[in-house]
Amino acid sequence: MTTPQKRHVIVTGGGRGLGTAIVRSLADAGHDVTFTYRSAKAEADALLKEMSAAHAGQKFAAESVDLSDKAAVEAFCAKLKDTPFSGFVHNAGASYDALAVMIDQEKAEAAMQVNYWSFVKICGTVVRGMMRAKDGRVAVIGSITALQANQGNAAYASTKAALLGYARTLAIEVGRTGVTVNYVAPGFIDTEMLAGYAKYREKMEEQVPARRFAKPEEVASIVTYLLSPLASYVTGAILPVDGGVSAALGIHR
């Protein structure tokens, strides 16, 4: 039987939706968790209170950080240098939909800053400590849009594809140090981010082989596994959690 290993994990975008499910799942697995949020202060405070009450002896903290602000990210990374982390989950994300030939560069760059560059900056800070300790786990919440084209998603998919390229390269660069890096590729998750697609939901679900959207907890459980001792030989992997969307041809008779 593999002995559970307690980690101190930093999770970006932990105040709402999938991020909150990840924080809860990691806490249930016995980890200490620090998570970031941007505007969800009330939700973050409630989550901290909930986790502290449910998991005595574990440590939890919430940090307000606007990952779209380069200076704020730099200041946050400077602060992180004083705390060793053995796990990092990049969940924070910004969406931007536009047809490929209609992309607004400023809006696309804003999404890239949150989805990609903030991850690169935080990785550069926390992974060095993991390498010195010869132990660490990095899990990236990407998207199946990095693997399968979807109309109107060129800018968003590009940010997720950039994450994929960076994560897999980092995996082979740090593999010998005992640090693993993996890419989780969810499909549609039943969170507030999909609220704008409510009127299309029934039609969208019909096209998913599983005939439903994912529950946040189903994606969070994969992240928790990747941070467990049982996943010590899993690195550089792409793990779709999409109900079969990426396995389907997409054209039906």
Image (tube, helix red, strand yellow):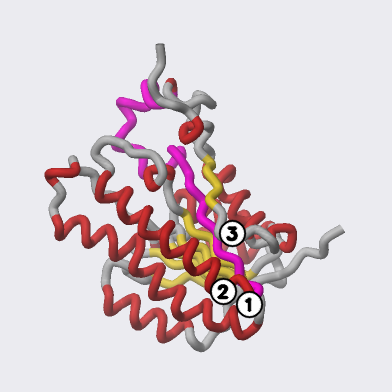
Residue found 37% across the figure and 21% down from its top: 203
Please indicate, yes or no, whether residue 52 appears anywhere in the rendered image: yes
Residue at numbered disc 2: 174
Crowding at mark 2 (Cα within 10 Å: few <14, some 14-19, many 20+): some
Pointers 3 and 2 in contact (CB under 8 A)?
no
Crowding at mark 1 (Cα within 10 Å: few <14, some 14-19, many 20+): some
Pointers 3 and 1 in contact (CB under 8 A)?
no
The answer for how far apart the CA atoms under marks 1 and 2 are is: 5 Å
Residue at numbered disc 1: 177
**Pointer 3 or 2: first along the chain:** 3
The answer for how far apart the CA atoms under marks 3 and 2 are is: 35 Å
Q: Name the quarter where the N terminus is drawn.
A: bottom right
Which residue of the protein is positioned furthest toward the bottom in this rendering? 82
Amino acid type, label 1: Thr
Residue found 33% across the figure and 39% down from its top: 149
Amino acid type, label 2: Val
In front of the other: 104 or 43: 104
Q: Name the quarter where the C terminus is drawn.
A: top left
Residue at numbered disc 3: 50
Amino acid type, label 3: Glu
Which residue of the protein is positioned furthest toward the right in this rendering? 1
Look at discs 3 and 1 and give the one toward the viewer: 1
> Residue 242 appears at what percent x and percent y?
50, 37
**Pointer 3 or 1: first along the chain:** 3
Region in magenta: 178-205
Q: Is residue 17 left or right of residue 86?
A: left
Q: Mark 1 falls on what kind of element? A: helix
Residue found 43% across the figure and 43% down from its top: 144
Q: Is residue 135 left or right of residue 202?
A: right
